[in-house]
Image (cartoon, grey):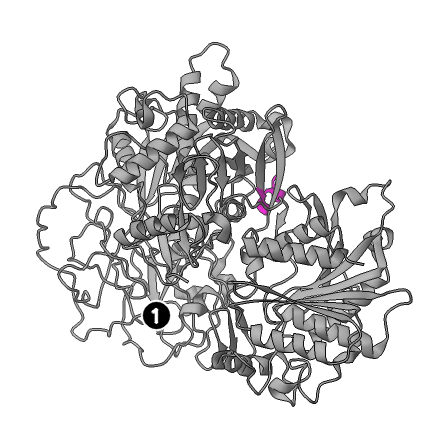
Amino acid sequence: MGPWITFTTGFFEIFYYQLDWGPGGGGVVKALYTAAKARRNVLPNHAITLPTHSLAMDLSSEIILDSPYFRIYSDRRIDRLIGTSTVPPGFDSATGVTSKDVVIDGDTGVYVRLYLPDTAASQSDGDDTKKLPVLVYFHGGGFVTQSAASPSYQRFLNTLAARAGLLVVSVNYRLAPEHPLPAGYEDSFRALKWAASAGNGDPWLSQHADLSRVFLAGDSAGGNIVHNVAMMAAASEGEAGSGTAAEAAAQIEGAVLLHPGFGGREPIDGETPEWMETMEKLWGFTCPEATDGTDDPRMNPLAAAAPGLEKLPCKRVLVCAAERDTLLPRNRAYYEALAASRWGGTVEWLESMGQPHVFFLFKPGCDEAVALMDRLGLIFQGLSRWLKLAFVVFNATASIVVAGVLANGAAHSSHPRHFSFSSGSDAARLHPKMDNTNNTSKLDAQIASIGRPPPSKGHGAPKTPATPREISAAPPPPRRPAAAPPLHPAAAAPPSRRRAAPRRRAAQPPPQNPNPIPFVRRRHVVLPPEVAKLLPKNRLLSENEWRAIGVQQSRGWTAHPIRTRPIAIPRYEYDIYAHRLVQPLELKNAHEVAGERKESRVLLAAMDPSTKLVFDTPLLRVHDDGRVERFYGTETTPPGFDAVTKVASKDVVVDGGATGVFARLYIPDHFLAAEHKKKLPILLYFHGGGLVLDSAASPMYHRYLNSVSSKAAVLAVSVNYRLAPEHPLPAAYDDSWAALCWAASGADPWLSDHGDTGRVFLAGDSGGANIVHNIAMTAGARHGLPSGVCLEGAILSHPMFGGKEPVDGEARETREIMENLWPLICPQSTGGLDDPWLNPTDDGAPSLQNLACRKLLVCSAERDYARPRANAYYRAVKQSGWRGSVEWFESVGEEHVFFLHKPECDESLALMDRVVAFLAED
């Protein structure tokens, strides 16, 4: 087992957790480790797991390019190691966005995935003022991997469509090497023309799209495509018969290049020979027709043979880069060349500090990703980036404590932020307590005018920022070491390479309070400008409460707020500047504050300092007043048809709506045909999550059960039982039993027409496997299943069991966690960890001979913390005298429920084969 290693290339970043030193793989791992160590990119806390089989080397032909993401052979074969998983379109309940796939070229199979936010429902066909801008998006992946159906792009574009109010057209262009460039460019240009012409009558585009406002955007290789498609549109304007292409060029309002993939033969700003060689090989593989290598104008828009950048047809361009991205020098060079060209538009630069390539796809909740999303929303909405923020600090004695988190980069930027703090989530994560130790002095001040300084032009002297109309007191600037940076990552231009001239001191600094306010850390709340302007008559100010007014500018009073680049990013210490003072507001009503502007809503985080945490983990937090915060397992995906597995799914309410329990049904699509008379085994599946997390709509369970249903030819019923602690046990057991009886009765047409109630299986993982055991015991004790229903088998994958006394190999920490968790799950339990529901091997538990099924498969993993209990259960069943057959299956070198997170690794595939065989055996 090796360390956590990050290896960065221009198009991807991946984090290793386990290193496979199999045949031929050691050299690759060693090279990656050396490269990562040289870049000082050893991180202890992030992971995107690489399939363990990915380092197995195919020796049938020479490998010309080997990376953690794909492997290219001399015979032009490619092994894609990531970017092949897909999710179906549909409704996303988290964002209110609906998506669908539309084929735009039947000959090539190229399709687009459209995203339509729920705001479009209120728009009428004839009201063009309410129609949505159109964003044509091109995914990344080095031209060789990923797709428009990738889960990471589905999540990113759902969020972007909702936040920015866009109709998104995500293009699934053809990939090299099967379809070498320029195929990808041609497909993308065709998609632009298709969108600009209202999608040949597609109702979403014809009814909801503002075709006078078309934007292009893409990341990595998709950022490269943005530039080339824009240039193709510009070149077509003067061509005879160009028609739609010319219209498309005229309709492009702006372009966003996210970490664009550019190159060149001559290195710039520290590009290494190894990186240059990698790019040369990749480009030669994806575009074999190129004669100039990476100086091909499509890869190097700054090459001598490239067309002039002044020909770009759009009005605005935003170039986004990341500090730790290998492509940063090329991105900056592109921005500077465009800014220096005779192009008549506006170009802006945004650099995400401390982040790697396309980090926003893999870490969408991090501070820099949130700041980037906000910036994208602004450019698509056409808003100014020069409005200032309002900063307010509350003490813990306020009647309602607002625990909003100041996102990293939020206060450092000069553009307005649109905040949407959700109750008990991000805010509470960083602010578990609001104590009374940092109360600040009361001051008097008036609300400063909300000024909007004019944008600076070039590199001339900065404009004097707006100042408050009246100041009676202000805290002094916090002292910082001489090398400390002004905290302001959203620069309007990349930093100059020249040494900055010494700054002149201001003759008179702002008036300072003779009794300075103690500096308060981690207590800042940011409000939108509308809230900051509210007057006392609006009853949003507590009477005569004036607290903690203003935060100060670092590195002197004259440091320019836009062009001063930070050299470090603080995490929780927001001693950043504000040019004006604001009245601190005590928020009385979240709805009053939000007003009618949805994007500026502020929700109270309800972090009452009187509450205490009774259970606190990185996944779950429970307060003593009953509030529960889940930081994992809340993501959902809609049912529908899965094009990869050819499985259809739907959600059906199980109990008539009394409890809200539903089941997600999965069936191979071809079995729905009328001519199919074969009945399918019924598999009831209970998801994991320790009985407190996750759902049947989770993306990973949706993917897993699509695969199981397809490979095993079963009708799967995934049960969305109620979770503890809101619904303590036996609620989950009751829901699961009700779902079993419901499915066995054939209550749904899929079940009655296609389900074989004579062959019913139970399966589940972790907490769901615990449910499997208890339901099988209930069935054996009650004999309550309908006539003709037979529980043929049960699969317990990495089951969650416990006990007061340790078993061989069980870690003390595992028992301690369960000692804290079990009382929340089952507060009525009197036996503690030896409750028969949790410890079926205890002397006081019912006999395992009562198991109602005919056969049992117990699965575990070598490095699973729950393995000792699972093995003890297997041995107890085997020795109990139960008449059925029990089997043990162990995955070597893997961890708890690894098959959900790494479905394509060797051990996951082997486990899937065993599960399929178990379901097929009669």
Q: Position of residue 405 (x, y in %)?
A: 40, 64
Say which quadrant the N terminus sits in: bottom left
Say which quadrant the C terminus sits in: bottom right
**Image check: 48 left or right of 793?**
left
For this orientation, the residue located farthest to the top is 240
Q: Secondary structure at mark 1?
A: loop
Residue placed at 49% from the left, 59% from the top? 594
Q: Eyeballing the image, is 503 above or below 259?
A: below
- Confirm whether residue 731 shows in the render: yes
Q: Eyeballing the image, is 140 above or below 401?
A: above
Q: Position of residue 350 (x, y in %)?
A: 32, 44
Q: Which residues are magenta?
A: 116-123
**Quarter of the figure with residue 785:** bottom right
Q: Main secondary structure of the magenta part?
A: helix
Q: Nearer the viewer, residue 619 or 907?
A: 907
Mark count: 1
Q: Nearer the viewer, residue 1 or 68?
A: 1
Q: Residues within 10 Å of mark 1 (few under 14, many from 20)?
A: many
Q: Is residue 273 magenta?
A: no
Residue placed at 82% from the left, 60% from the top? 759
Q: Which residue is mark 1?
A: 523
**Image check: 234 left or right of 861?**
left
Q: Position of residue 74 (x, y in %)?
A: 43, 31
Q: Is residue 122 magenta?
A: yes
**Quarter of the figure with residue 402:** bottom left
- Confirm whether residue 624 shows in the render: no
Q: Position of residue 175 (x, y in %)?
A: 50, 32
Callout 1 amino acid? Arg
For this orientation, the residue located farthest to the right is 787
